[in-house]
Amino acid sequence: MNRRYRKTIIAGNWKMNKTASEAKAFLEELKAQVGRVKWCEVVVCVPFVNIPMARRVLKDCRIAVGAQNVHHEQSGAYTGEVSAEMLKDLGVKYVIIGHSERRQYFGETDALVNRKVHAALNAGLRPIVCVGESLEQREAGITNELVTMQVKAALAGVTVDKVRQIVFAYEPIWAIGTGKTATAEQANEICELIRATIRKIYGARIARAITIQYGGSMNAKNAFELLAQPDVDGGLIGGASLKVPDFTAIVNAANQE
Ligand code: PGA
């Protein structure tokens, strides 16, 4: 973390979990625990159907609401999809884009991720763009090349005035939901690489202002060490975001003055 230059952001990615009633009880409890934290931003990326309720429950606290996906077009005949404007209108602040599960199970490509980034930015949403390598790619020694490519592709056509709205999440696929975490050094190395890639395109001032999270089995035990790394500015948390005590512990690890 480097609070001098950029915001630390802890975002929960609930994925396809929690009914509306489970979500409501959870958010009321979470609000009591971390609704007033000062030194980091807390986000819950809930399923679409829980967004209006989440906004109601969280309206008088500091926890922001995020979505997990967005369509790249503004409106039209796209059955089952949700637009950036619809999300913005509900008071959503962040949207996860290009999560590896979307890339893997729903065929999302770097080009589509880029279109979604533009759609989100145009609507005034902050994209959380996920990048990261599979185990095979890491073992083949192509992690740096791949992540650099993913970052450049996501940023294609994004102007200097909008790029600061983007958050990146480095999520090594082999660490997601597996209980295997990247070491703090591995996480920092790739977050630094992402920042260097941004620096080459937009310059040092912008690069140092961008929040870059780590994601992949971050939990109450390892959060502190990961967040202590200079280029790890927060976390995108799946499994551990589904339990109030675990997520609270991670927020507390980030909420350092
Ligand atoms: P995990 O998921 O924390 O359960 O590994 C992270 C993510 O997929 O964003």
Image: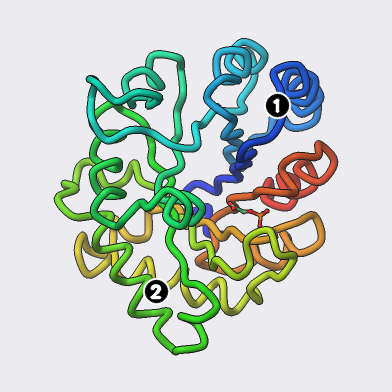
- The residue wearing badge 1 is 35
Q: Quadrant of residue 150?
A: bottom left
Residue at 81 percent across and 36 percent down: it is: 244
Image position of 67 (left or right of 11): left
Q: Label 1: how many residues lie within 10 Å, few (<14), some (14-19) or many (20+)?
A: some
- The residue wearing badge 2 is 193
Q: Name the kind of residue labelled 1 in the image.
A: Gly
Image position of 53 (left or right of 19): left
Closer to the camera in the image, 232 or 149:
149
- SS for callout 1: loop
Residue at 50 percent across and 37 percent down: it is: 68
Image position of 178 (left or right of 202): right
**Distance of mark 1 from mark 2, alpha carbons?**
33 Å
Residue at 37 percent across and 26 percent down: it is: 81
- SS for callout 2: helix
Nearest to viewer (mark 1 / mark 2): 2
Closer to the camera in the image, 169 or 227:
169
- Image coordinates of residue 2 in percent, x first then y, are 52, 59
- Image coordinates of residue 128 in percent, x first then y, are 43, 46
| Quadrant location, ligand no. 1 | bottom right
Q: Name the kind of residue labelled 2 in the image.
A: Leu
Residue at 70 percent across and 26 percent down: it is: 35
The answer to whether one can see residue 156 in this image is: yes
- Image coordinates of residue 209 in percent, x first then y, are 37, 53
Q: Label 2: how many residues lie within 10 Å, few (<14), some (14-19) or many (20+)?
A: some
The answer to whether one can see residue 5 in this image is: no
- Image coordinates of residue 116 in percent, x first then y, are 29, 41
- Colouring scheme applied when the structure was drawn: rainbow
